[in-house]
């Protein structure tokens, strides 16, 4: 293992091409630098510096050592930064899991702001669906979850607040048979047609499937965007976030239908473990508590024509 002084010596010689200039950069006498260079050669039992020319050059062996030294210096610098970062209360990594209904594109401005403030903290974003979102926090696969639905479960140290409520609309494709049925749709109407659902990603417990009634077949898709597209194409029926399909309803690609059993708005939560509140987590919680951002995340992005 090279010492910090040896790493600095190799870097200085490589960049300046002179023992005297390397000595000046390091604030040491040329004789001291020359002695250190010879000691380094003796230690590796290899000729590292070509002294035959006016400009000091590295031999092939010296070049390999210098390249490795530069890499080690960078690693030491990063390690020092990480140690100081953690000592000052910033986490090494923050793992954020969003429910799939939360669109990552809406969080990118916050990611940029966070990078400008704490670029040393590694951010990791993944997504889960329904029960899988709470499960990620419970199982240690998330430091922070955003957009989780259903009542908060029993998780040690759980802390949470409401992000907002998602409004739903029952919608079918304009050419779907249910688009032409008179009056509110009852269970007998819905049971005859396939429901489109977003598959629950829970690994340990039975998943949830909203909007499916007994005896009804279903098509499970990976995310809400796929569900919207499938229903627009007439592949099934179901409840959709009103704000995200506003344009499709307006232009007639989807048709809103009243149902005998309406669906209440769904409360969406932000949650974390209270024993893990570093500065990065606190920063994100402050952002998510801002009404304007919370509203954007809940409403989502409107699906436009041709999506």
Image (cartoon, grey):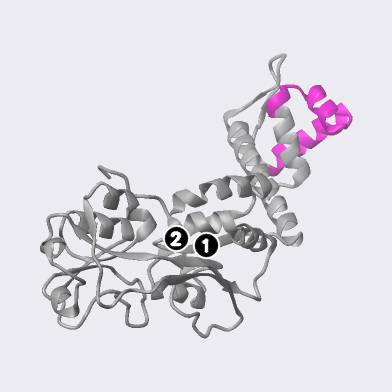
21 falls in the magenta region = yes
Quadrant that contains the C terminus: top left
Q: Check disc 2 and report its element: helix, strand or loop.
A: strand
Considering only vertical position in the picture, is 260 above or below 34? below
- Residue at 26% of width from left, 60% of height from top? 227
Q: Do the residues labelled 2 and 1 touch (CB within 8 Å)?
A: yes
Q: Check disc 1 and report its element: helix, strand or loop.
A: strand
Q: Which mark is residue 247?
A: none
Which segment is the magenta one?
A: 14-43
268 falls in the magenta region = no
Where is residue 298 shown, x and y percent of the image? Answer: 46, 60
- Residue at 72% of width from left, 14% of height from top? 54
Prevailing secondary structure of the magenta residues: helix
Considering only vertical position in the picture, is 106 above or below 66? below
Q: Residue 126 carries which label?
A: 2
Residue under label 1, please give it: 96
Q: Nearer the viewer, residue 177 or 207?
A: 177
Where is residue 45 shown, x and y percent of the image? Answer: 66, 40
């Amino acid at each position: 293992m090279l010492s910090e002084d040896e790493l600095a010596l190799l870097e200085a010689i490589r960049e300046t091409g002179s023992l005297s200039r390397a000595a000046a950069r390091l604030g040491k006498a040329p004789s001291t630098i020359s002695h250190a260079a010879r000691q380094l050669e003796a230690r590796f039992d290899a000729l590292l510096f070509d002294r035959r020319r006016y400009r000091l050059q590295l031999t092939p062996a010296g070049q390999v050592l210098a390249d490795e030294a530069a890499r080690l210096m960078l690693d030491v610098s990063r390690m020092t930064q990480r140690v100081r970062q953690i000592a000052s209360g910033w986490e090494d990594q923050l793992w954020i899991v969003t429910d799939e209904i939360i669109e990552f594109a809406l969080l990118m401005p916050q990611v940029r702001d966070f990078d400008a403030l704490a670029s040393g903290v590694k951010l990791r974003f993944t997504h889960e669906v329904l029960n899988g979102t709470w499960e990620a926090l419970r199982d240690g696969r998330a430091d922070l979850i955003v957009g989780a639905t259903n009542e908060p479960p029993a998780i040690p140290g759980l802390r949470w607040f409401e992000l907002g409520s998602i409004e739903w609309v029952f919608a079918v494709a304009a050419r779907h048979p249910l688009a032409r049925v008179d009056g509110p749709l009852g269970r007998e109407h819905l049971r005859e047609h396939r429901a489109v659902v977003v598959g629950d990603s829970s690994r340990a417990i039975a998943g949830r499937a909203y909007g499916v009634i007994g005896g009804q077949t279903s098509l499970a898709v990976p995310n809400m965007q796929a569900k919207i597209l499938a229903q627009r194409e007439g592949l099934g029926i179901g409840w959709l976030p009103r704000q995200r399909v506003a344009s499709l309803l307006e232009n007639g690609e989807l048709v809103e239908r009243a149902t005998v059993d309406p669906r209440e708005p769904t409360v969406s939560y932000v949650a974390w473990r209270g024993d893990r509140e570093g500065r990065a987590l606190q920063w994100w919680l402050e952002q998510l508590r801002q009404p304007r951002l919370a509203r954007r995340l809940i409403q989502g992005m409107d699906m436009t024509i041709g999506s």
